[in-house]
Amino acid sequence: MTAGWAGRLRCVAVAALLAGLSAGHALAALAQPAARPNIVLIVVDDAALMDFGAFGGEARTPNIDRLAGRGAMFTGYHTSPLCSPSRAMLLTGVDNHRAGVATIEEILPPSQKGRKGYGLHIEPGVLTIADRLKASGYRTLMAGKWHLGHGPGQLPNSHGFDRSLALDASGADNWAAKPYMPYYKDAPWFEDGAPAKLPKAFYSSDLLVDRLIGYIDQAPPGRQPFFGYLAFQAVHIPVQAPKAYSDHYQGRFDAGWEALRADRAARARQLGLLPPDAEVRGMPAGARPWKDLTPEERRTYARGMEVYAGMLEAMDAAIGRLQQRLAQRGELDNTLFVVTSDNGPEPSDPVHAGGMNIWMALNGYAWRRDGLGEAGSLNFIGRDWASALSAPGQLYKFYASEGGLRAPLVVAGPGVAPGRRIGSFAFATDVTPTLIDFAGAAPQPGAVSVDGRSLRPVLAGEAEATYRPDDPVGVEVSGNAALFRGDLKIVRNMPPVGDGRWRLYDLKADPGETRDLAADRPAALQSLLADYAAYEARVGVAPMPEGYTTNRQLLSNALRRQGQFLGLGVGIAVVLAVCAIGALVWRRRRRALFTPPES
């Protein structure tokens, strides 16, 4: 069977899954929620809107797909364009600036350090969902990426989690406890607030699920409800997976990124993620034509995507083991699952950055087709594959276009009608109030108020939308910003990819953001800009320094950190040597693809 026919049959099967239950039948089958369900919040790192099989993706994700079939798929859910701000909002229900995590430390300019909201840790008085559920009698458990503050008082054990295995960094190797970029000296893993010793051999998705299962098994079934936060490293850089999973996709991406973007756009129409007559742009200006790559380059880049799909499948298999264990404990039917992504796909190419070849050699990394994605491989997908994956949206992680903000969201379990498709707008801050609602958690006097709203009414079919047409919802991270109101959205993307100019789109008719309405509807533009100005003032958005770009700031911050690691004298010498050698390497490379940083 050809890849094209396989894709069409897969799309038909997914469409049948989604359409199999009428709304009336779904509501009739609505399970009565238990008074205190278990809750599992799963966050995938850098997954695109269409990466899960139920959303039309290429990877095999049967366990997530089953949750989508017996629960609800949100197709209008949005988040922030970067990991830490998104996670702060997901876990607190509070805007990222008010929560204290305006951006990520790797790209923070000196002019913003010390400002309120830019401490890059959860502020005093801001409660996590773990804080709130623990106060209501839940056991609170976590395994995975944290990246919301360092050291005593800022790790998960100080924010409501009874047990936690936490990576306090933007990412790390998936096969060993080592860093993946020069900003870090090591891979800072902590268990219950103390430095953790990881097994000698592990794969991250399996390690995290094993640890969460171990925490769950420390109490007998049914005695006390639990909240589990499972924050995977998949599919963040380094993109790594067991070879057996990656090999499932041999040849699947050989047609290149232009073909993948067109294929996803077609499936988006068939699945209702895109109106039938809506436009979708092709690959962005500056993208390399797939045909211009050498045969060896095409094989290497295609293998990188095979590993990406394998990493998603390996993660899904780990989720399946968690579900199986809950079934063995008799708790699966009373567990509410939430599965989402923190932002859109990752465009960065760290491998070809100046001087990176030296750092990779010193840290046991290589980038070559043989063994790509396996131990010792620093694999990435890069800007062109990220542009393809973000279809039907524009751009990707870091930016406030739909490719960076529109993410998958699945909610399934007691109290959720099966087979539901919810197209109304939802935002990252809505997850915590939704979980508070399902758990019946008591209010916490003196806590910072949440910004989000419970999605439970739309999940139960009691409301068509969570927000009124005149309710504005804003988001800003490192100058990239958007504001939603009804069907309209204004968006500003900063250099190096954007130009800092505000644009206006009608997302209902044009979710691909292909027709800027700013000139045609100036009154609407000014009205939304006024709403955005009010949002900035309310949450405390700090101005960006002149000439700021995320890639330059990352380089500056990483060099400064390396100097701190090595000591001043040695650090300066090494930094100068790396810069000089890196500049030579950079000039000699035919394609220097480094785009903004990973987080």
Image (cartoon, rainbow, N blue to C red):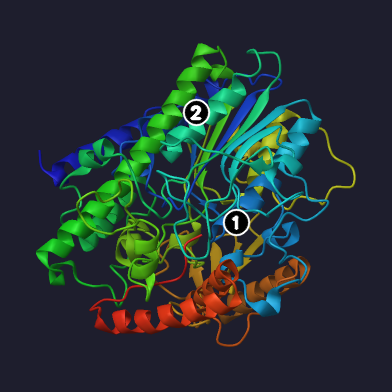
**Could you tell me residue 433's position as x and y percent?**
70, 42
525 vs 275: above or below: below
Residue identifier under label 1: 84
5 vs 449: above or below: above
Return the disc, 2 or 1, that comes first in the chain's sequence: 1
Residue drawn where x is 60% and y is 46% of the image: 465
592 or 470, which is in the foreground?
A: 592
Amino acid marked by disc 1: Ser
**Could you tell me residue 35's position as x and y percent?**
71, 20
Horizontal placement of 482 versus 35: left or right? left
| Residue that sits furthest to the right in the current view | 445
Using the rendered image of the protein, determine whether residue 344 is visible from the camera's viewpoint: yes
Crowdedness of circle 1 by 10 Å Cα count: few (<14), some, many (20+)? many
Amino acid marked by disc 2: Asp
Q: Quadrant of the N terminus?
A: top left
**Could you tell me residue 244's position as x and y percent?**
25, 36
Horizontal placement of 426 versus 495: left or right? right
Residue drawn where x is 55% and y is 65% of the image: 488
Q: CA distance from mark 2 to mark 1?
A: 24 Å
202 or 566, which is in the foreground?
A: 566
11 or 544, which is in the foreground?
A: 544
Residue drawn where x is 38% and y is 54% of the image: 274
**Could you tell me residue 568's position as x and y percent?**
60, 77
| Residue that sits furthest to the bottom in the current view | 546
Q: On residue 563, which mark appears?
A: none
Horizontal placement of 73 versus 51: left or right? right
Residue drawn where x is 36% and y is 51% of the image: 239
Q: On residue 210, which mark appears?
A: 2
Q: At numbered mark 2, what does the secondary structure look like: helix, strand or loop?
A: helix
